[in-house]
Amino acid sequence: MDVVIEVTALPEEHLLEGTLAEPSEEDPWRSYRRTEHALRIRWSSATQVAMGNPQHFQPGALLRAPGTLRLRDEVEAEGIVVKSKVATIQ
């Protein structure tokens, strides 16, 4: 599973809450649209981070996380890509 979220909260260490973002039809690599679907991403200190670092995991950040669905609405990230500087959300 590969998801993109806009972070809304950091409820605990190594857990991100956010809103699922879907690629826009106009530019699916750099433009996303918000959905109503809430999603959580669990990560660890061993999770590889690209195009940024864990300090960028703040509310408003746009993050891509390939991983495994572990619980309903929770993905265990294999890696996280910080897309905030290269993509927009509408």
Image (cartoon, rainbow, N blue to C red):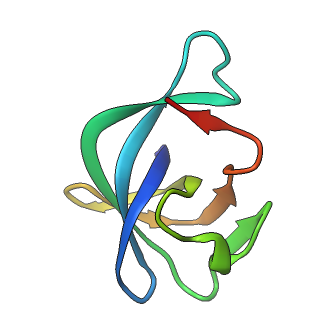
Task: Report the side of 25 relative to 48 (left or right).
Answer: left
Q: Where on the picture, by quarter, is residue 79?
A: bottom right
Give the residue at x 54% y 19%.
24
Q: Where on the picture, by quarter, is residue 89?
A: top right
The image shows residue 86 at horizontal and vertical percentages of 76, 42
Give the residue at x 56% y 11%.
25
As drawn, 27 above or below 37: above
Task: Report the side of 16 relative to 44 (left or right).
Answer: left
The image shows residue 27 at horizontal and vertical percentages of 67, 17
Give the residue at x 19% y 56%.
72
Report the residue that reaches farthest toward the top.
26
Task: Report the side of 13 relative to 65 (left or right).
Answer: left
Give the residue at x 69% y 38%.
87
Q: Nearer the viewer, residue 85 or 28?
A: 85
Q: Nearer the viewer, residue 14 or 75?
A: 14
As drawn, 63 above or below 25: below
The image shows residue 20 at horizontal and vertical percentages of 38, 43
The image shows residue 31 at horizontal and vertical percentages of 62, 27
